[in-house]
Amino acid sequence: MISPRIHHFDTVDSTNDVALEMARRGEPEGTVVIGKRQLKGKGRRGRSWWDEPGKSVLMSVILTPDRPPTELAHLSFVASLAVAECLEAKCGLPVSLKWPNDVLVRERKIAGILVETTHVPSGTAAVVGIGVNVNQKEFPPDIAFTATSVALEKGTVDSVDELASALSEGLFANYETFLVEGFEEILGRWRNYMWGLGRQADVAAEGRSLRGTVAGVDSTGALVLRDSLGSDHAIRAADAVVEVLP
Ligand code: BTN
């Protein structure tokens, strides 16, 4: 079992950037960077990640699984599952997971995952960044109708730090499962939370656009979209945009 080495910071540009730099300097697997505030929080697809000081979990974890780089994307399933299980167990929230790794409560996003990699002397290190909206009661206008927080869904959380610890414990437990039992075990549990199954969606990936019914996630973690003729398409691109139709 990996023992976490937790580093707390007050203000950073991005906990992912701090963890990437630490990994390059040789900090080992299990290093956890927690920030109270980010000035340049990063989201997927070049977006920014907004936070209000002290009111979110902002966490990045260095992991170095001995797996081919193509499989490092599996870590986003390991992490989103840990967030879903933690928010369900600790906060009693009805959580669902939107492929590839958005964490939703009642159709609104409560948490996001950003996995980045860097070269280190021993090969490749992954940094798994997790942002959870915890005690925010208001959001900036551009995300006001799509974001939510634990406080808005359930009530204020007494200790954001305790939630962060529970989350890091869950993440390491799931990572251990991933290493020992394999990705299928994680996927099996991930599928229980999958959002959008059976719904019509437009998916834009690798410069093409597809419309179909969300049919599931295959054994590699690709989204399966069934077109109107009944053919299945596996969507692998990490930068795919899935828009479920009303
Ligand atoms: C997304 O777009 O859904 C991913 C958001 C990831 C945000 C987290 S907050 C902690 C870590 N540091 C960052 O700069 N980003 C991730």
Image (cartoon, helix red, strand yellow):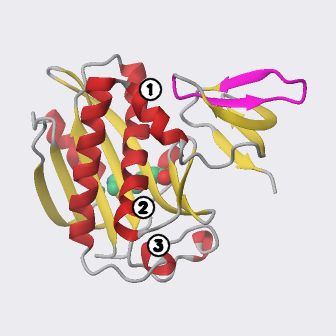
Q: Of callouts 3 and 2, which one flags the residue occurring earlier in the amino acid sequence?
A: 2
- Marks 3 & 2, CB-CB < 8 Å contact: no
Residue tagged by mark 1? 184
Q: Which residue shows up at 37% across the image and 35% down it?
A: 75
The part of the chain drawn in magenta is 220-234
What type is the residue that disc 3 sits on?
Ser
Badge 3 local density, few (<14 within 10 Å), some, or many (20+)?
A: many
Q: Which residue shows up at 47% across the image and 83% down it?
A: 137
Residue tagged by mark 3? 149
Q: Which residue shows up at 60% across the image and 75% down it?
A: 144
In the image, residue 87 above or below residue 72 = below
How far apart, in angstroms, are the residues tagged by discs 1 and 2? 21 Å
At mark 3, the secondary structure is loop
Q: Of callouts 1 and 2, which one flags the residue occurring earlier in the amino acid sequence?
A: 2
What type is the residue that disc 1 sits on?
Glu
Left or right of 141 on screen, residue 178: left
Question: Residue 118: x and y, percent?
Answer: 28, 31
In the image, residue 149 above or below residue 49 = below
Residue tagged by mark 2? 88
